[in-house]
Structures are given as C-alpha cells and as structure tokens.
Image: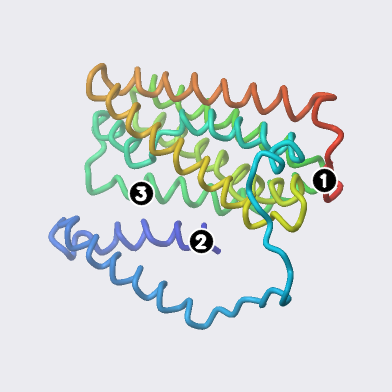
C-alpha cells in the first residue's frame, strides 16, 4: 500500500503540474498538506500495551555477540547503502538526455509502477526460495540500474534504468525487514528494525553527499559508477556472510 501511494503521487503530480503553471513550489506545498493528513491519521492507530513488569531489552555488545548474523547483515546493508544514490539525484540524468522537467514525474511513476507490480510476486518468491536469494537479485538490479543510467544516451535507456531500480526496491524494501525479524530474538524486534532503518538512512545520507559531490565535480557518469561499485561491494559482503557456514548457527524464526 505504501508503494501504491508512491505510484499515485507522481502520477497526480504530473497531471496537476500544468494546472499550477509548472510551479514545483506550489506542488510541494500541496504535498506538505497531504503529509499533514497522514500525521493526523495516526490518531486512529492503537498499539498493544507491553505487559507490566516486563524488562526492556538493552542494546549493548552482548546483543551484537548474540546476533552475529544480524550484525553482518546490517554491515552489508550499510555498505550497500553507501552506493544508493537518492532517486531525486538520479532524475537529473534524464534531463541531460533531453527529457523535459515537466515529464520527470513520469519516470518516477514508471519506477513506482514497477515497484508495485513486482513487490507481491517477489515477496512470494522470497517465501518459496528464500529471502537471501531474493535480496541478492534486488542488489543485482540496483547495480544494473546505475550502470545502465551511467551509459544512457537515450530516453528509452533511462526508462530501462528506472524499471530496474523499481525491481531493486521491490526485492529488498519489505524483504529486508522480514529477514531482520527472523535474525533476532523477538524481544529485540523493534530495536533491530530501528538499526536497519538507521543503517539505511545514514548510508543513504552519505551516498547522497558523496554522490552529489562527485556528480558536481566530475559528472553524472562517475557518480553512477561510484554507486554501482559500492553497491557491488555491499552485495558481496551480504553473499559472503549470509551464504556461508559462518552464519548458519542462528535462526530465531527458521530463516531459510
């Protein structure tokens, strides 16, 4: 459902942008208003209360010792994330290929449609063949997306890059969280999900900072090659520590 909203948002933006005289400032203000409605909607969300007297889990060195596999999983996600350029930065490349600024939301729409269309099939694939294998497929699609966009000379190539990026998100976004839930003691579930989000958020921030600097100093191709290289390193770390004997002594929820 999150992806469906992400798909409809760019489509609506594309349709109403001409009505706003092409003003992205007005468009962002409308998006801000929609975002406020989301915050107010949480008033209706009820959370289960924690049993009285239950001890809260602590995040310390013992946690990482007990969850070795999860620790290297987070490391691989962090390194991979150092290469994940913000999609807003990637959307600058199609402009240099002759795609008008007014049509840029369509590329984001194509990315979102791919994400939505592939999310459930890839989720089923992960349940059948394993989450690790599905995540590796996603990592490979991200690397392919960066390489295609780096060498793109036509609008069609840019479209192919954003389709590949959509498959990457569909193969990793929810599946990484599902894998996290199976790599930790259930008492640490919220903490583990928080660590996953922190690894993704911090690495994405650094990727945007470094990638943006390279983009400005040397051009988009070098920034995209940087993204593909770091993503490939993160994927290798993930494969080494999630498909080896090293990690098979932990399975809190029968992780395949």
| The N terminus sits in image quarter | bottom right
Instruction: Please give the name of the residue rendered at 37% of the width and 76% of the height, measured from the top-left corner.
Output: 37
Q: Position of residue 85 (x, y in %)?
A: 40, 34
Label 2 residue SS: helix
Q: Is residue 195 above or below residue 161?
A: below
- Disc 3 marks which residue? 106
- Which SS class for mark 1? helix
Res 68 → quadrant: top right
Residue 30, percent from left and from top? 25, 68
Spatial separation of the CA atoms under disc 2 and disc 3: 15 Å
Asked if residue 138 lies left or right of residue 202, the reply is right
Residue 161: x and y in percent read: 45, 32
Residue 191 visible, this angle = yes
Question: Residue 4: which numbered mark, if any?
Answer: 2
- Locate residue 45: give its quadrant: bottom right
* Residue toward you, 70 or 106: 70
**Residue 43, numbered circle:** none
User: Does residue 204 lie above or below 37 as drawn?
Assistant: above
* Residue that appears at 44% across and 25% down: 227
- Alpha-carbon neighbours of circle 1 within 10 Å: few (<14), some, or many (≥20)? few
Q: Label 3: how many residues lie within 10 Å, few (<14), some (14-19) or many (20+)?
A: some
Reading the chain from its start, which is encountered first: label 1 or label 3? 3
- The residue that appears at 34% across and 27% down in the rendered structure is 210
Q: In the picture provided, is 89 more to the left or to the right than 41?
A: left
Give whichever of discs 2 and 3 has the lower sequence position. Answer: 2
Residue matched to label 1? 128
Residue closest to the eye, 6 or 64? 64
């Amino acid at each position: 459902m999150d992806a469906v909203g992400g798909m409809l948002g760019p489509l609506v933006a594309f349709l109403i942008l001409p009505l706003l005289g092409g003003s992205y400032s007005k468009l962002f203000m409308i998006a801000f208003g929609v975002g406020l409605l989301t915050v107010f909607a949480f008033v209706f969300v009820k959370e289960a209360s924690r049993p009285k007297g239950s001890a809260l889990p602590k995040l310390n060195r013992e946690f990482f010792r007990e969850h070795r596999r999860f620790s290297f999983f987070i490391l691989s996600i962090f390194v991979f994330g150092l290469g994940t350029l913000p999609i807003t930065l990637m959307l600058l490349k199609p402009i240099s290929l002759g795609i008008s600024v007014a049509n840029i939301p369509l590329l984001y729409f194509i990315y979102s449609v791919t994400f939505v269309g592939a999310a459930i099939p890839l989720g089923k694939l992960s349940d059948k063949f394993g989450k690790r294998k599905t995540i590796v497929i996603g990592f490979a699609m991200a690397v392919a997306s960066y390489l295609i966009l780096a060498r793109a000379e036509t609008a069609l190539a840019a479209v192919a890059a954003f389709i590949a990026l959509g498959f990457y998100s569909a193969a990793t976004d929810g599946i990484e969280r599902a894998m996290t839930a199976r790599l930790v003691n259930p008492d640490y579930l919220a903490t583990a999900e928080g660590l996953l989000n922190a690894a993704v958020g911090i690495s994405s921030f650094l990727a945007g900072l470094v990638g943006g600097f390279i983009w400005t100093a040397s051009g988009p191709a070098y920034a995209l090659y940087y993204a593909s290289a770091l993503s490939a390193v993160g994927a290798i770390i993930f494969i080494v520590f999630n498909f080896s004997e090293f990690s098979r002594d932990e399975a809190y929820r029968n992780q395949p």
